[in-house]
Image (cartoon, coloured by chain):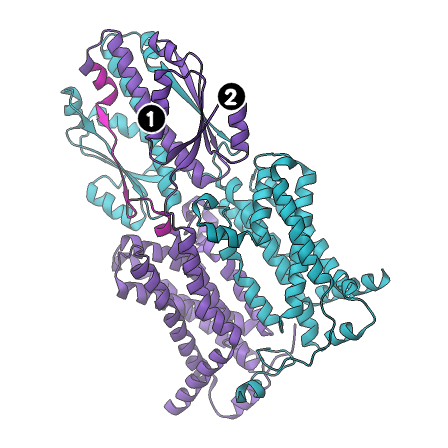
Chain colours: A purple, B cyan
């Protein structure tokens, strides 16, 4: 029995290695993905949002507004324009994202305590820019509005401390927990790289059964006396071991080289990754069992694997999706994995919280493997046709 | 012409006969469009779960609580009312934001001392993080203004005087092109175009490999039909179906997901046609040179995520290193996606996207050239490499011995 197992393990490892495209995909795909995504997000934050100014007043007061804008986190005054039309054109062309128009007589109106209005325009086409830009503008609005208000009150004879108190008696400090610098690389790089990893895994897992019973050699294997459970168990062990070996350099790059946050420790991370690798392998095996050939198995597996990341709520939150769809999303192992990885790496909520993630992924594995076994039994292990 | 139509007819019969391929090119685009549509249908992040820790329990602190209760941006979670519960709630995702009002809040206000309200948000998901930050700013700006107005009223100023002081300088903030900051408008068509590319490539990507596996490709190579006719005949059904899918996905986007699609129809059609030509001809070239269907499927399946992420569609290309930008610009997707959204979201005319159109034309010409002039030279069957369920047996003895 042990000898048989060893022979199957060696054979499977050899077959995986011999399958050139799969070998390259497994060895290079996730690592290349990690390096690419780390490169893409190497700026880490959306800062220096190009801002264009139309100062139609050119007074000391208007220059003070410009100075406030210059000092605002995330905004960078990139251009000055003579007219609103020029600013509009520049926003259309994407040269600036934020436009500020300071009206004529701005300084004079402030001095005379007349109302005046600064117009701010934000290009909403790219949300990464737009949300940051609006936060930055709202901050300037409050601070500059307060400064002018205090000056106006003092000019009207209100005592300086009272004027200040009217505007600045409450401070609103903010804290971003778990990712205090709002670093985009922390948020996305690992998720995207693991997305590529799970796609590569799916490609491999989809071969588990069809890679055997879709071939004419299947009858020889049956004749050799190896039971199907032993054969597929040993194959699965090799696949899952390879999946885990592949993720190690990826995690090394992520947490040691790029220093992404890891709140939970290596043991938790690896054990959670292992349970997901088993669940995903079981899903791929099930797809493999219902397919008539390897191409279709790959298609079925990838039809789930491709959108799974978007559905998982790793980026756009699950809570913002329709209620019924949220329930459906939890039927995918990827949803449990990507949600779990986010919790583990950023927050480490403890075993009490994470235990049901492990439990569900484990149950999924049992369910999918059982479905694959039933399907195989139903077909009485007959070799399949060439094509659907 | 008849030869082209004959090949197209034969290809169409193949598509109809091979059920998975049929579903792949007719149903999967609609399936993905619907799936992503459901994901992004709300478009705007609202009712963010918020925990308020009111340590003061005064009339003044309740005014702060009310300010957060009266906005649709937040949904106050009542059970999170202590700092420990807030910490735990943030860790388990029960709440994504928190407000802490200190126990001496009202006392300090009455003693005219500086006090503070701490705002906390979850940075582990930056879509939450940045939106919450913006919502906090909005709520607190309004709250601040109300507080200032109340204070000035306490100093004996009239309502008109208060308005005059507070509105000395006012800001009007306009968000152009996507005024509600809808994520659906922002991201949906980017993903949809990626689906279009992916399914387009996967459809035609197997047209030649399938023939190779059935030993029928040799018939094409030896027939007295020129290479360009074979390409056009085989590509025609996919080209038409892809273009149909392009329209279908846009219809789903506008009708069900409320994605903003404006702009010149002619430009949208032109971009779609150019992208379709590139996808179909590139997919055909891949199919000609890749030995089997499995290999083509595996590689084509994996390209979507890296291209989308590095394309500058979501994370701006101004914040991506130059070398990655230059590399990704060799692909058609970034040009198409950017051109498409400039037309449909910004409603820009041709002069603004002429560079994108020109690049797509060049790419279309190059890919067409390779597709139309593929080599018809007959080669002996490739004996290495994997072809599960193909005509080459697996395991293959020759590669085994090597």
Q: Secondary structure at mark 2?
A: loop
Badge 1 or badge 2: first in the primary sequence: 1
Task: Tell me if residue A306 comes above or below residue B94 in the rendering.
Answer: below
Is residue B365 rendered magenta in the image? no
Q: Secondary structure at mark 1?
A: helix
User: Same subunit under labels 1 and 2?
Assistant: yes
Looking at the rendering, which quadrant does residue A262 occupy?
bottom left
Which x, y percent locates residue B350? Answer: 65, 37
Tell how many labels.
2
**B389 vs A336, nearest the viewer:** B389
Task: Tell me if residue A84 comes above or below residue A225 in the rendering.
Answer: above
Assign the N terminus of chain A to one quadrant of the image. bottom left
Residue at 34% across, 59% down: A254
Q: Pointer 2 indicates a residue of which chain?
A: A
Q: On the image, numbered disc 2 is attached to which residue?
A: A83
Q: Is residue B319 left or right of residue B311?
A: left
Residue at 58% across, 71% down: B295
- The answer to whether one can see residue A373 in this image is yes
**A103 vs A291, nearest the viewer:** A103
Q: Which mark is residue A68?
A: 1
Task: Give how far apart the Cα atoms at labels 1 and 2 are.
Answer: 21 Å
- The answer to whether one can see residue B26 in this image is no
- Label 2 neighbour load within 10 Å: few <14, some 14-19, many 20+: few
Which x, y percent locates residue B248? Answer: 65, 47
Residue at 51% across, 41% down: B186
Is residue A168 rendered magenta in the image? yes
Q: Is residue B102 left or right of residue B165?
A: left
Q: Pointer 1 indicates a residue of which chain?
A: A
State the extent of the magenta-drawn residues as a range. A162-187
């Amino acid at each position: 029995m042990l000898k048989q197992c060893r022979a199957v393990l060696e054979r499977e490892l050899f077959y995986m290695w011999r399958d050139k495209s799969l070998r390259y995909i497994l060895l290079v795909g996730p690592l290349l993905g990690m390096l690419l995504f780390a490169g893409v997000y190497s700026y880490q934050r959306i800062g220096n949002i190009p801002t264009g100014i139309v100062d139609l007043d050119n007074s000391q007061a208007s220059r003070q507004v410009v100075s406030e804008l210059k000092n605002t986190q995330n905004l960078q005054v990139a251009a000055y324009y003579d007219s609103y039309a020029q600013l509009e054109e520049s926003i259309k062309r994407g040269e600036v994202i934020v436009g500020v128009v300071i009206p004529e007589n701005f300084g004079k109106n402030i001095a005379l305590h007349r109302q005046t209005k600064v117009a701010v325009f934000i290009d909403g086409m790219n949300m990464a820019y737009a949300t940051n830009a609006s936060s930055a503008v709202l901050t300037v609005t409050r601070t500059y509005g307060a400064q002018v208000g205090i000056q106006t009150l003092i000019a009207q004879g209100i005592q300086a401390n009272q004027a200040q108190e009217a505007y600045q008696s409450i401070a609103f400090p903010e804290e971003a927990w778990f990712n205090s610098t709002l670093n985009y690389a922390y948020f996305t790089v690992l998720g995207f790289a693991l997305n590529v990893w799970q796609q590569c895994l799916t490609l491999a897992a989809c071969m588990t059964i069809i890679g055997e019973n879709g071939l004419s050699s299947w009858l020889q294997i049956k004749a050799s006396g190896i039971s199907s459970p032993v054969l597929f168990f040993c194959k699965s062990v090799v696949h899952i071991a390879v999946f885990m070996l592949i993720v190690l350099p990826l995690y090394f790059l992520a947490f040691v080289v790029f220093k992404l946050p890891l709140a939970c420790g290596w043991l938790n991370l690896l054990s959670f990754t292992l349970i997901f690798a088993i669940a995903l392998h079981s899903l791929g095996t099930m797809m493999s069992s219902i397919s008539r050939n390897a191409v279709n198995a790959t298609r079925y597996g990838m039809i789930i694997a491709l959108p799974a990341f978007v559905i998982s709520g790793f980026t756009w939150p699950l809570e913002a999706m329709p209620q019924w769809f949220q329930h459906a999303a939890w039927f995918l192992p990827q949803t449990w994995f990507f949600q779990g990885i986010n919790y583990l790496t950023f927050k480490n909520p403890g075993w009490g919280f994470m235990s049901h993630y492990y439990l569900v992924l484990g149950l999924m594995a049992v369910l999918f493997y059982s479905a694959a076994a039933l399907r195989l039994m139903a077909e009485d292990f007959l070799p399949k046709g060439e094509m659907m | 012409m008849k030869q082209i139509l004959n090949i197209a007819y034969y290809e169409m019969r193949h598509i109809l006969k091979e059920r998975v391929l049929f579903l792949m090119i007719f149903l999967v685009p609609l399936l993905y469009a619907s799936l992503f549509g459901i994901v992004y249908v709300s478009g705007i992040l609202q009712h963010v779960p918020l925990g308020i820790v009111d340590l003061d329990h005064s009339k003044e602190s309740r005014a702060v609580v009310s300010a957060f209760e009266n906005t649709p941006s937040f949904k106050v979670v009542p059970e999170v009312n202590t700092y420990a519960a807030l910490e735990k709630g943030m860790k388990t995702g029960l709440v994504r934001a928190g407000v802490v009002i200190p126990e001496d809040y009202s006392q300090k206000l009455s003693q005219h001392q500086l006090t503070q309200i701490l705002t906390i948000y979850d940075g582990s998901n930056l879509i939450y993080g940045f939106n919450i930050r913006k919502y906090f700013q909005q709520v607190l700006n309004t709250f601040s203004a109300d507080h200032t107005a109340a204070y000035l009223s306490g100093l004996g100023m009239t309502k008109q005087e208060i308005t005059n002081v507070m509105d000395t300088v006012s800001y009007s903030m306009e968000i152009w092109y996507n005024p509600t900051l809808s994520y659906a408008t922002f991201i949906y068509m980017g993903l949809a175009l990626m689906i279009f590319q992916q399914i387009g490539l996967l459809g035609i990507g197997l047209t030649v490999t399938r023939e190779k596996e059935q030993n029928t490709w040799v018939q094409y190579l030896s027939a007295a039909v020129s290479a360009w006719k074979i390409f056009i005949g085989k590509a025609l059904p996919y080209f038409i179906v892809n273009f149909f899918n392009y329209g279908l996905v846009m219809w789903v986007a506008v009708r069900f997901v409320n994605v903003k699609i404006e702009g010149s129809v002619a430009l949208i059609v032109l971009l779609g046609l150019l992208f379709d030509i590139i996808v179909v001809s590139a997919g055909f070239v891949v199919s000609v040179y890749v030995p089997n269907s499995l290999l083509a499927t595996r590689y084509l399946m994996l390209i979507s995520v890296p291209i989308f992420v590095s394309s500058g569609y979501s994370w701006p290309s101004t914040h991506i290193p130059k070398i990655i930008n230059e590399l990704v610009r060799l692909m058609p997707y970034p040009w198409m996606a950017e051109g498409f959204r400039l037309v449909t979201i910004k409603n820009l005319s041709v002069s603004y996207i002429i560079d994108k159109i020109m690049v797509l034309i060049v790419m279309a010409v190059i890919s067409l050239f390779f597709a139309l002039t593929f080599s018809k030279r007959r080669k002996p069957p490739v004996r290495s490499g994997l072809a599960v369920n193909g005509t080459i047996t697996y395991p293959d003895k020759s590669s085994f011995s090597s």
